[in-house]
Image (cartoon, rainbow, N blue to C red):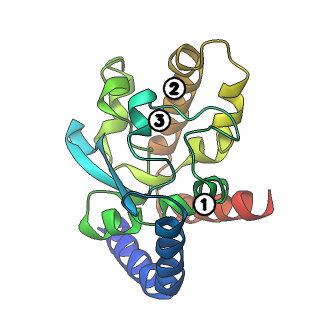
């Protein structure tokens, strides 16, 4: 209950305060390339139920048909504006509306696509017992994931066999120590790592 109240208050406050920035980003995206401003994608949420996650579009239309993973700092599928939106995680801001609607939390395991969730072991599926979040320990640790994958011969295999299991391990660590103080700490670490390295 405390977590939900915290999520509601902070997400609503951020939406109000950031509304001019959200509008500027929307205009930038629209003027930079054709396509929708908001990108919607089905992800797996609480108790394994699908929901639509919102992001600012950072790729050219239909780019996800060429793969779900972004590889390298300059993936050719990423637009000019998208590069900077991704670099500073600004593409994630529309998920504040997912938090407001109750589908997500500010902090929690990042929601995956069904393709990868279907590979989870029974133990790993425990991460689906809590609401997914905009940020978590794994988001901080793997904030440059696309650059790591750029050096892999088979990026998807590396993601499935190495990165994803470690992310789930970090998620389970979060669940074991979940609390308001932990959430505030993760939010601060996310902000400081993204903007101050």
The answer to whether residue 192 is above or below residue 151 is: below
Residue 194, visible in the rendered structure: yes
Asked if disc 2 and disc 1 are in contact, CB closer than 8 Å, the reply is no
Left or right: residue 126 versus residue 193 is: left
Q: Earlier in the sequence, mark 2 or mark 1?
A: 1
The x, y position of residue 170, in whole percent, is 55, 36
Q: Residue shown at 41%/36% (left/top)?
A: 64
The answer to whether residue 23 is above or below residue 168 is: below
Q: Secondary structure at mark 3?
A: helix
Foreground residue among 35 and 11: 35
Q: Earlier in the sequence, mark 2 or mark 3?
A: 2
Q: Residue furthest right?
A: 197
From the image, tell me which residue sits under label 2. Answer: 164
Foreground residue among 146 and 167: 146
Q: Residue shown at 47%/41% (left/top)?
A: 176
Q: Earlier in the sequence, mark 3 or mark 1?
A: 1
Asked if disc 3 and disc 1 are in contact, CB closer than 8 Å, the reply is no
Location of the C terminus (image quadrant):
bottom right
Label 1 crowding class (10 Å Cα cut-off): few <14, some 14-19, many 20+?
A: some
Q: Which mark is residue 172?
A: 3
The x, y position of residue 44, in whole percent, is 29, 39
Q: Residue shown at 51%/86% (left/top)?
A: 20
From the image, tell me which residue sits under label 1. Answer: 81
The x, y position of residue 41, in whole percent, is 32, 46
Closer mark to the observer between disc 3 and disc 1: 1
Residue 67, visible in the rendered structure: no
Left or right: residue 89 versus residue 36 is: right
Foreground residue among 80 and 140: 80
Spatial CA distance of label 2 from label 1 is: 27 Å
């Amino acid at each position: 209950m405390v977590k939900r109240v915290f999520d509601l208050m902070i997400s609503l406050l951020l939406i109000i305060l950031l509304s001019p920035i959200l509008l500027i980003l929307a205009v930038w995206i629209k003027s930079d390339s054709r396509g929708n401003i908001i990108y919607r994608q089905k992800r797996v949420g609480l108790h394994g139920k699908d929901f639509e996650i919102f992001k600012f579009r950072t790729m050219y239309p239909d780019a996800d048909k060429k793969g779900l993973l972004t590889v390298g700092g300059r993936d050719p599928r990423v637009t000019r504006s998208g590069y900077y939106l991704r670099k500073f995680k600004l593409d994630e801001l529309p998920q504040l509306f997912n938090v407001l609607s109750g589908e997500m939390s500010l902090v929690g395991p990042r929601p995956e696509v069904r393709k990868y969730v279907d590979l989870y072991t029974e133990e790993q599926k425990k991460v689906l017992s809590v609401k997914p979040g905009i940020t978590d320990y794994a988001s901080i640790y793997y904030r440059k994931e696309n650059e790591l994958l750029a050096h892999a011969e088979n990026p998807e295999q590396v993601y499935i066999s190495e990165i994803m299991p470690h992310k789930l391990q970090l998620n389970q660590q979060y669940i074991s120590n979940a609390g308001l103080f932990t959430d505030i700490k993760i939010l601060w670490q996310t902000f400081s790592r993204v903007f101050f390295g």
